[in-house]
Image: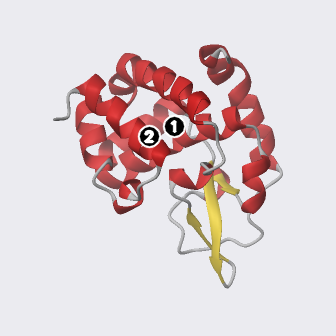
Amino acid sequence: MINWKNYYYTEFPDVLRTYSQTRQPKHHCPHCKAPAQRRCQVDKDIQHEPYQFRFAWFGITLFDQGLFTYFPEASKRWVRATGGYPLPVEQSGFGCVRVAAPSRLLFDTDNKDKWSEYVTFWMEETAQHFEQMSGVDPHSFISRVSEDKDFRKQSPFLEHLLNAAEARFYLN
């Protein structure tokens, strides 16, 4: 069992920084709204990265993209508070990239028990820190992002996260 708090705050930032430094897109796509310095190209090889790295990056990307899309002013506050984590981007053709949906970091082969452990940690951190850092309460955030077409794509991982969020933040 991984100590998520230790990994998330001690190891993950350095691992993500190192990972993103070697994966800058070759072209500057003017269509992508992600700042060029925050873009980190992902491809099919991402599935071979350790699950704890991908799960942690999923959570950060869900916050970042959910705020950017549904709470623009809060997004600015979040980026100021966090410094702006690298965003996973993927090729969309002709040298263009787009920000990948957070679920792009999850795979059917991921271990559901390990995911469940991560979700427990993520819910606790969300309850303790998210509103302070973004100005958006977790209930409002989860309610909005769970309506997004990329979030609604049913996978057992997203379904588990949503069920846990509904229980924790009383979305019913």
Task: Return the residue found at the far left.
Answer: 172
Q: Quadrant of residue 10?
A: top right
Tell me the distance, in whole angstroms, between the alpha carbons under discs 1 and 2: 6 Å
Q: Nearer the viewer, residue 109 or 69?
A: 109
Q: How many marks?
A: 2
**Disc 2 designates what residue?**
63
Query: Residue 115 appears at what percent x and percent y?
Result: 56, 33
Q: Secondary structure at mark 2?
A: helix
**Mark 1 neighbour class, 10 Å CA radius: few under 14, some 14 to 19, many 20 or more:** some
Residue 132 against residue 162 in the figure, above or below = above
- Judge from the rendering whether residue 108 lies leftward or rightward of residue 80; answer left or right: right
Q: Hey, what amino acid is under mark 1?
A: Gly
Q: Contact, CB < 8 Å: mark 1 with mark 2?
A: yes
Amino acid type at circle 2 is Phe
**Can residue 136 be spotted in the picture?**
no
Q: Is residue 138 visible?
A: yes
47 in relation to 128, above or below: below
Give how far across and how far down residue 96 sits, in percent: 63, 76
Task: Specify the label residue 59 is tagged with.
Answer: 1
- Give the answer, above or below, for where 78 lies relative to 24: above
- In the drawing, does residue 14 fall left or right of residue 81? right
Please report the residue visible at 73 percent of the width from the left and 52 percent of the height from the top.
46
Picture residue at 26% right of the left edge, 47% below the top: 144
Question: What residue appears at the point 60 percent right and 37 percent down from the top-left corner?
Answer: 55
Say left or right for 158 vs 16: left
Q: Tell me the SS state at disc 1.
A: helix
* Residue that lies at the very extreme toward the bottom in this rendered image: 94
Estimate the x, y position of residue 14 in percent, counting from the top left: 75, 30
Q: Is residue 50 above or below residue 120?
A: below
Compare residues 25 and 122 and report the one nearer the observer: 122
Picture coordinates of residue 151, whole percent (x, y) = 39, 53
